[in-house]
């Protein structure tokens, strides 16, 4: 049941990613600018007192890293969800985790291809690599969380945790 819930959540998250990618460039840029302004308000004390032009310049300056961090974050979430959907902790992980990564990376490539048909957008191999790195990070985070959870639970499966002395 858990895996079905994660699979449904992964599909829903893919739809969310698709909807972000379907936004025309003006809408996407406006969203990034808004995030840049929020970051400015959060990290710079006197940001609110700055003139509007200076605020906009700051938001524009951090636009690229904001966009790339958003790409990686979207796909890290997808990596976590795919891991929850695919991973059977009773079986060897080394055969399952590549499937999680492959699905996420192929989806990233298809999403960049999709952007070729959106006005003002482009598909970039660099973004596929960033997205795939996000998937890998999400898979790693999910595995670390699973291992930490297994080590806290009473042992039902032998070999869950390594005892160190």
Image: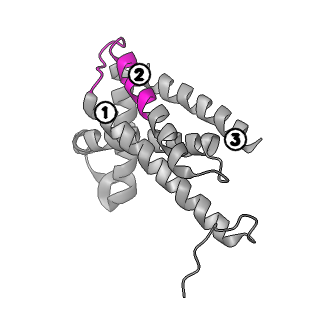
The image's mark for residue 67 is none
Q: Is residue 95 left or right of residue 161?
A: left
Coloration of the structure image? one colour
- The residue pinned by badge 3 equals 3
- Select label 2 or label 1 by which is in front: 2
Instruction: Using the numbered discs, state the Cα–Cα distance from disc 3 to disc 1 in whole angstroms.
Output: 28 Å
Q: Is residue 111 above or below residue 74?
A: above
* x 36%, y 35%: residue: 32
Q: Is residue 14 magenta?
A: no
Please state, as top left, top right, bottom left or bottom right, where the N terminus lies in the image: top right
| Sequence-first disc among 3 and 1 | 3
- The residue pinned by badge 1 equals 127
Instruction: Using the numbered discs, state the Cα–Cα distance from disc 2 to disc 1 in whole angstroms.
Output: 11 Å
| Sequence-first disc among 2 and 1 | 2
Contact? badges 3 and 1 (CB < 8 Å)? no
Q: Position of residue 70 (x, y in %)?
A: 40, 40
Q: Is residue 64 above or below residue 111?
A: below
* x 60%, y 29%: residue: 11
**Snapshot quadrant of residue 130:** top left
Q: Residues within 10 Å of mark 2 (few under 14, many from 20)?
A: some
Q: Is residue 43 visible?
A: yes
């Amino acid at each position: 049941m858990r895996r079905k819930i994660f699979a449904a959540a992964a599909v829903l998250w893919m739809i969310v990613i698709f909807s972000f990618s379907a936004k025309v460039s003006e809408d996407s840029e406006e969203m990034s600018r808004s995030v840049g302004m929020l970051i400015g308000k959060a990290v710079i004390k006197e940001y609110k007192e700055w003139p509007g032009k200076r605020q906009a310049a700051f938001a524009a300056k951090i636009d690229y890293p904001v966009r790339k961090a958003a790409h990686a974050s979207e796909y890290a979430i997808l990596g976590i969800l795919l891991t929850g959907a695919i991973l059977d902790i009773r079986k060897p992980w080394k055969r399952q985790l590549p499937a999680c990564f492959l699905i996420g990376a192929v989806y990233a490539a298809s999403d960049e291809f999709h952007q070729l048909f959106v006005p003002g957008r482009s598909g970039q191999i660099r973004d596929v690599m960033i997205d795939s790195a996000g998937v890998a990070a999400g898979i790693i985070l999910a595995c670390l969380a699973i291992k930490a959870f297994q080590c806290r639970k009473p042992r039902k499966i032998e070999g869950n945790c390594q005892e160190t002395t």
